[in-house]
Image (spheres, rainbow, N blue to C red):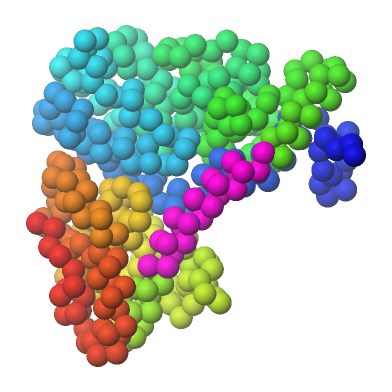
Amino acid sequence: MQTSTALPARGGIGPSSLDPMTALLHRWRDDPGGTYRTWFLWEERVKNFRSIRRGIQQVVAEIKAGTFGVAYRGSSLETVVHSIAEQRQIFKGADHAFLWKPKLRIPDIYENLDNQRAFGRLLDACVCCTTEQQVVAAIREIDAKAIKGLGPAVANLLYFLHPTIVPPFNTAIVNGYNALTGAKVKLGRWDEYLAMRQGILALNAKHRGLLSNDLGAIGGLLFDLGSGCYPAPPREDDAAARAAWEADLARVRDEGARAAKALAEARESDHTHTEVQGWLRDLGLSLGYDVWVAANDRSRPLGGGKLGDGCLAALPGFDTGAGADAVRLIDVLWLDKDSNRIVAAYEVEHTTSIYSGIVRMLDLALGSEAHALEGMFLVAPDGREGEVREQLTRPAFSRVADLKVRYLPYGELKANRETIARFGHGMKPIQAISRSLV
């Protein structure tokens, strides 16, 4: 029996009417194992932008104050790069470019204070600026310094400051761009990156309807191409080349094991995170509190309904402002019914870094609601306690002692939540099953 390799029709449009790039984009967007669905549409992704910005600001502040130090390990830079590297597969290995390589003495921003200050000025300029021209000017300024080992990998930091201006960067993305366009972009040079950026912007503008203003989308496509997940479409107008490419693309479609495994792993992580949020939601309601669930998690399915069922539709006192946006993304909040004051805050850290959760709690703790708080909790698997404690020794978490954040293990919450719901009152039972982190 002959197997068809033609692309499926979409909305009544047959494959012959789609140009190769459009056909590729349709296939990529529909692939459950591609970066579009596993990373770009991942709801947790957007939570990291503010925390990474805050981390970059801390790096800048330490460089200005002369307290950054001479090592990557344990630094505020390692903390923020590590949180980027945890952004699923596209940023895996993002810290490699920043690791100190002693034999080569690169990247030369640890021992050379002039270079370190120049790096700080780049980050500071990009934190403060708002236009494409300002960002590119800051990049050209650091390029002129010719700092050994400090190249376009820094764009992964800048992407989280300006996702509509700066595309992410790694070897796979460069390989994908070269395969797609026939270019010969080389790694490690800012001028090559800026040229590639112009080409990426042109591609993104041409196919914006299937991509996004956020350059993470096209970055994910190029990553998948460069990783060998998809064959690049033929650049020449050749029917035979087009047919061969469609056959290769159909082969990718039929290799469903990779996609199924990736999606299953992603969904399992999200499911467990959502399940624990549901425990905290139900426990808070049982104890007589109003409950807020993170704004971008409310519609997640849970049981026979949604995670946001029975919860507040709006968070009193947090209508506008960057800090308010961060607080609305805290996983679960308990509020006093009479005063609408936030009593407790919970961040569920199933597999990701604790950094983002701490930053959101910091926004809450520094606000006008701080005096009413009775507890701030990191909720994580029992086996992560040692890791969490180790992370909190970093300079980036020096404020945790002031916040009095506590560790609430999954096991304690699971074992005691029903008893607390039936017989508990107030925050005392939660305090009793949680552990001090300082």
Q: In this view, does 20 lie above or below 47?
A: above
Q: Nearer the viewer, residue 160 or 224?
A: 224
* Residue 84 can be seen in this image: yes
For image coordinates 37% across by 38% down, the residue present is 84
Q: Position of residue 89 (x, y in %)?
A: 47, 37
Q: Where is the C terminus found, in terms of image quarters?
A: bottom left
For image coordinates 71% across by 39% down, the residue present is 253
Q: Where is residue 321 in the image (x, y as percent from the top left)?
A: 37, 57
Q: What stretch is highlighted in magenta?
A: 255-276
Position of 302 with respect to 352 (left or right) is right
| Magenta stretch, main secondary structure class | helix
For image coordinates 71% across by 40% down, the residue present is 254
- Which image quadrant for residue 22? top right
Q: In this view, does 264 lie above or below 15?
A: below
Q: Nearer the viewer, residue 96 or 213?
A: 96
- Which image quadrant for residue 222? top right
Q: Position of residue 295 (x, y in %)?
A: 45, 64
